[in-house]
Image (spheres, rainbow, N blue to C red):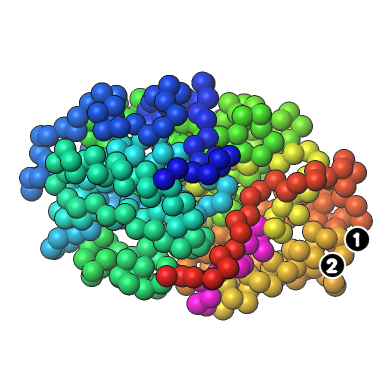
Amino acid sequence: MTPPAGHATVPSTRPGGGPARLTAGWQQMSRAATLSEHVARYGPLPQAGRGSRRNHRMLADAVTRAGLTGRGGAAFPTGTKIGAVAARRGPAVVVANGMESEPASEKDQALLARAPHLVLDGAVLAAEAVRADAVYVCLSRSRPWQAGQLAAAVAERQASRLDSVRIEIHDLPERYVASEETALVHWLNGGEARPVNTPPRPSERGVGRRPTLVDNVETLAHIALIARYGPDWFRQAGTGEAPGTMLATICGAVAGPGVYEIELGTLVVDALAMAGASAEASAVLIGGYFGTWHDAAAVAGLRLARPGLTQGGTAPASSTAPDSNTAPDSNTAPASSTSPGAGVLAVLPAGACGLTETARVLGYLAAQSAGQCGPCVFGLSAIADDFAQLASGRPHGPVLDRLSRRLGVVSGRGACRHPDGATRLAASALGTFAADARAHAQRRSCQAAWRGRPAAPVLPIPRPDPDGRWR
């Protein structure tokens, strides 16, 4: 199946976007690479150690030395995850997370549509490393053509008898929280695509009660490259503390919206210049709908870098995506950098109202709650309502005081990280657009009103599923 006409499933990667690793050949080919084209581009997978007892140690060690962290948003060290699953007893399972529930992101869609075999290579290598006999690729049900394209790639590999493990494709309901790793496991186990309480973590007891490695599809593609070319090659891009490249979706007030491969440590101003960001842009949202708003001028000199492990052994992230497995902490990133989270940079036009855009997103996030705990069911809906009042310029009572109190009560109280991401977005909007917030709260016009607001909204909001399905 192919995407409908006009649907930007595969945004363009433009020259100057950084070293072409994951995106090698994308400029010359507007379709998925066949298996033979893929092998010609990257070479065959290395055979040394594959299938042996030493393989999990070899791959985990190589990925650890490369410094690869998860590309789904949490930035957890990938080698640590592989080692944790491989250390468990019995056969394991690998889940390739291609849900991409972040509405502003298209990086995973682009990767799967252009280089599906790179993702599948990484998934198979990871499966061999953790002694798994199955790979489950999870995709959003809202993109049926994506499942069709990937099924064709799997069929090619089966015909060539390439893989030692079974690969299955599953399509899940389109829900923002459905891409969280426990939600994926719960759905694969026959339940609904809602997050569940932990422990145990999926790495301890996941699909079929077996140890389960859940990785984002971009992370798996990087594993395939590290297995071929080694940790030192991977570290030739990026910085010492944040090595490698990442896929970033740059959208909004830019001349060339699309997916770009950039080195970690790239200055925000340079990343935005690749896409031709408007010189009059007022603000930029970094990390997606669980991310943070920043004044465009103030953030220009910061570097996009995923923070590493803290002394406590957790991976902080200033903007944690819904498939993350780590508590977000916006105070742990170095002052000279900002975490790209899910790899989204959305540029706000000069005439747009950041409060209005944030109110739209918060309304969407409140509606996407799994409905399993009070902070989401009651807290997010109340925050979204307050923000909608603020954005309208006709609030009831001391709306800023209410928001301050509610943000403090809801943050850190949910069963999953959904309320944390939403409250972080709201708090960053109140800080970045503080002058506008005061004007709106006092029923006065903000700067956007004086400049003239654009007719169309900037940030995409998916249409709700009319059936409200979780299964």
Q: Position of residue 382 (x, y in %)?
A: 69, 73
The C terminus - image quarter: bottom left
Q: Earlier in the sequence, mark 2 or mark 1?
A: 2
Task: Give the magenta part as a residue range.
Answer: 361-373
| Residue 15 visible within the image | yes
Mark 2 lies on residue:
395
Q: Residue at x 21, y 55 (%)?
A: 134
Q: Return the mark for residue 443.
A: 1
Task: Please tell me whether mark 1 sits on a helix, a strand or a loop.
Answer: loop
Q: Residue at x 71, y 41 (%)?
A: 348
Disc 2 and disc 1: Cα gap in Å?
Answer: 8 Å
* Label 2 CA crowd tier, 10 Å (few <14, some 14–19, many 20+): some
Q: Is residue 152 left or right of residue 85?
A: right
Which amino acid type is marked by label 2? Answer: Pro
Report if residue 112 lies within the magenta region.
no
Question: In which quarter of the view is residue 133 placed?
Answer: bottom left
Q: How far across and how far down the image is residue 274, in percent?
A: 58, 26
Amino acid on which disc 1 is placed: Arg
Q: Is residue 228 above or below residue 97?
A: above
Do the CB atoms of the residues marked 2 and 1 lie less than 8 Å apart? Answer: yes
449 and 84: which is toward the camera: 449
Residue 425, can we see it?
no
Q: Quadrant of residue 375?
A: bottom right
Is 369 covered by the magenta stretch? yes
Residue 36 lies left or right of residue 325; in this view the side is left
Residue 211 badge: none
